[in-house]
Image (spheres, helix red, strand yellow):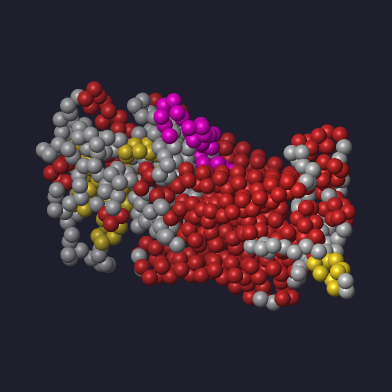
């Protein structure tokens, strides 16, 4: 098993485990993320232009051959790699690794070279091609804890850092499962688990060691903080 | 000996300073047209800044398109400068004389234009100045030196500085000539620029030493600039970018496109500025021979790039190559690229008649640069289109009208800057030409005719 913790401070090491055997591809996580994180509405035109902004998206793939074929789903979000390819290519330190194992995007520093987006093998980084707009009656539902990003900068999943900050403010001890990112909270099948990997008793730490666990594109050596669980079905 | 025609000093002065000392109508017309195109491109840039990068054809996951292609292209063009002036000066190739200044000046302007490209391309260009220049000492927030995007400007600004010095050092004797032929405020300005040049032996010696020194010092830059630019791709994780052969491949490709651009420039200059007495078939012939070698070396590295991919059979990389080679429109662009940059021009250059024909050389050299632009596009975009298995939104990149306008604008900008330069400074170094003439002067000693000057090696 690859090293779990490379962060300098031992306080927290946030991580996530997604059980693909439980995922139904319902997209609840996508919608929850959308409303929690002030992501502009992705209309048809945004998708057709290839410019939809989704911090988490559900990728669908097929397993087996017709007629014995099954649709499988894989929610992809920023993997918060310990060895993140996006960080080393940013000329202005707009993205860096913080001491809680998070890959952090500093919107204010970002100049929009988009090199991080090119270098992310998970396609988790998104660029704001336009100034974000919401219909007038949507303006009051914006989350006051989350920055509205301007055009010309990169953004991506933060593991709902605003919730992490609120819960751990002032070095407050936080119980396992006391808070969750919006996607985890919204998941109806409890496929997603979030927590502190430095806490050996946390739910996520137990699942982290599950024998079904794997990381996406592990061969690249990015050492993600997200693991997926999947039963390998020989007859699928 | 290349110098078959004998020109008097007076004739050299008159013909080379023609455009500097008076303003022909055609010059005004061309400058106005180019100025209009550049103004058009500037407003396209303003529009893009006002609206956002949404007006480009970029989309997930193709974050880099025409602007970065254009950046690589112009850095490539700039490699002609050192190739022609530094290497040929150090190797004492006589045929370099009429083309050194044009090549070096084009280098400077191409580098300026290439530096504009990443700025245009950035999401918030105004922030680049804010964060990167100057360093934010007060808060200890530095640019990240691990990023190739910090190496890039470092390399290019080094090259720009040394090239500008190079152009200026070689310009001093000519500035003095113009100073002596002008009056009023022009005389003052040229006088200041000429740094009190009187052409005494000590000044000539210092100027010669400076030229040789700069030539030698610029050589490492010659190798490093495009190597560093290639590392923008080489150090990334993107399949088919992440290859070690990129540095030499990019450098030699840069020389290929740069020297071809010099050929184009020389032929256009000869026609426009009526330099028939200075740019001859022999010069173009010599560059074309150089190009055959450079182009073939470049093809070898291109071949290596392909072979390494085939050798590894790494799935993602094979997918990218499959896209490049077999899937339209990339397959068509690929065909155009390889045909334009090698298959048509190089066999043609084998023929002496082609090498000595200005028309043929103009079209083949232009063709090479169309091909080389496509090469960069084919390196950049297909790799991003297939960079990972997680792209479920397969789509291609279609440059928008704004991007095309800005590309055309960048070509017009370099041309415009060259035209403006030619108004104030001679495009062919007067003193180099005179020196060349001196080397072929002959004197009669008894009943023998011998060279007046023996060049020591």
Residue B139 in which image quadrant: top left
**From the viewer's perspective, is residue A79 above or below residue B290?**
above
Q: Is residue B180 left or right of residue B240?
A: right
Name the residue: 66% across, 70% down: B289
Closest to the observer: B78 or A234?
Answer: B78
Left or right: residue B174 versus residue B340 is right
Residue plotted at (81% across, 69% down): B450
Q: Position of residue B444 (x, y in %)?
A: 87, 68
- Looking at the picture, tell me which residue is in the foreground, B383 or B206: B206
The answer to whether residue B127 is visible is: no
Farthest residue to the front: give it.
B446
Query: Which picture quadrant has residue A30?
Result: top left
Q: Quadrant of residue A183?
A: top left
The magenta-colored residue range is: B115-142
x and y percentages locating residue A84 in the rendered image: 33, 46
- Residue found 20% across the figure and 50% down from its top: A2
Is B50 placed above or below B407 here?
A: above
């Amino acid at each position: 098993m690859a090293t779990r913790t490379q962060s300098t401070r031992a306080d927290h090491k946030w991580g996530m485990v997604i059980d693909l055997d439980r995922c139904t591809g319902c997209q609840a996580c996508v919608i929850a993320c959308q409303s929690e994180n002030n992501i502009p509405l992705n209309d048809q035109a945004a998708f057709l232009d290839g410019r939809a902004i989704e911090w988490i998206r559900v990728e669908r793939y097929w397993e087996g051959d017709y007629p014995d074929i099954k649709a499988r789903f894989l929610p992809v979000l920023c993997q918060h790699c310990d060895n993140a390819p996006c960080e080393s290519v940013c000329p202005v330190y707009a993205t860096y690794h913080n001491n809680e194992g998070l890959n952090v995007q500093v919107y204010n520093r970002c100049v929009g070279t988009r090199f991080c987006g090119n270098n992310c093998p998970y396609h988790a980084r998104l660029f704001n091609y336009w100034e974000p707009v919401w219909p007038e009656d949507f303006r009051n539902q914006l989350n006051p804890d989350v920055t509205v990003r301007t055009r010309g900068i990169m953004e991506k999943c933060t593991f709902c850092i605003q919730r992490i900050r609120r819960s751990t403010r002032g070095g407050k001890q936080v119980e396992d499962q006391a808070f969750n990112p919006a996607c985890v909270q919204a998941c109806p099948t409890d496929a997603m688990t979030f927590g502190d990997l430095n806490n050996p008793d946390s739910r996520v730490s137990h699942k982290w060691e599950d024998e079904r666990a794997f990381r996406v594109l592990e061969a690249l050596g990015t050492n993600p903080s997200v693991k997926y669980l999947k039963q390998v079905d020989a007859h699928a | 000996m290349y110098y078959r025609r004998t020109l008097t000093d007076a004739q050299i002065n008159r013909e080379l300073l023609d455009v500097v000392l008076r303003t022909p109508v055609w010059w005004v017309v061309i400058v106005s047209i180019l100025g209009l195109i550049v103004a058009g491109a500037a407003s396209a840039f303003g529009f893009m800044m006002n609206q956002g990068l949404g007006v480009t054809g970029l989309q997930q996951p193709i974050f880099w398109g025409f602007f970065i292609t254009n950046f690589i292209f112009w850095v490539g063009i700039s490699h002609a400068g050192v190739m022609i002036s530094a290497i040929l000066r150090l190797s004492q190739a006589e045929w370099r004389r009429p083309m050194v200044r044009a090549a070096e000046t084009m280098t400077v302007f191409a580098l300026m234009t290439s530096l504009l490209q990443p700025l245009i391309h950035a999401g918030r260009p105004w922030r680049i100045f804010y964060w990167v220049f100057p360093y934010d000492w007060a808060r200890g927030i530095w640019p990240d030196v691990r990023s190739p995007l910090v190496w890039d400007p470092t390399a290019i600004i080094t090259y720009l500085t040394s090239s500008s010095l190079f152009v200026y050092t070689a310009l001093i004797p000519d500035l003095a000539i113009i100073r002596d032929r002008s009056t009023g405020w022009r005389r003052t300005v040229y006088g200041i620029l000429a740094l009190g040049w009187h052409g005494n032996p000590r000044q000539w010696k210092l100027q010669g030493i400076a030229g040789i020194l700069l030539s030698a010092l610029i050589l490492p830059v010659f190798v490093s600039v495009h190597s560093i630019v290639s590392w923008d791709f080489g150090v990334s994780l993107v399949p088919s970018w992440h290859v070690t052969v990129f540095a030499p491949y990019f450098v030699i490709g840069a020389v290929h496109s740069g020297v071809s651009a010099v050929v184009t420039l020389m032929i256009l200059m000869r026609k426009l500025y009526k330099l028939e007495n200075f740019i001859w078939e022999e010069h173009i012939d010599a560059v074309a021979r150089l190009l055959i070698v450079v182009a073939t070396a470049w093809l070898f590295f291109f071949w290596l790039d392909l072979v390494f991919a085939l050798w590894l059979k790494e799935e993602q990389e094979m997918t990218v190559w499959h896209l490049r080679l077999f899937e339209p429109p990339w397959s068509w662009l690929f065909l155009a690229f390889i045909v334009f940059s090698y298959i048509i021009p190089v066999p043609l250059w084998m023929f002496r008649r082609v090498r000595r024909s200005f028309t043929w050389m103009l079209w083949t050299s232009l063709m090479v640069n169309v091909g080389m632009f496509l090469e960069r596009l084919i390196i950049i975009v297909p790799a991003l289109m297939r960079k990972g298995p997680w792209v479920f939104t397969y789509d291609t990149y279609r440059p928008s009208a704004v991007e095309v306008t800005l590309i055309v604008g960048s070509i017009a900008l370099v041309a415009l800057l060259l035209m403006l330069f030619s108004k104030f400074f001679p495009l062919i170094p007067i003193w180099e030409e005179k020196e060349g003439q001196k080397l072929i002067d002959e004197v009669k000693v008894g009943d023998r005719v011998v060279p007046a000057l023996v060049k020591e090696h």
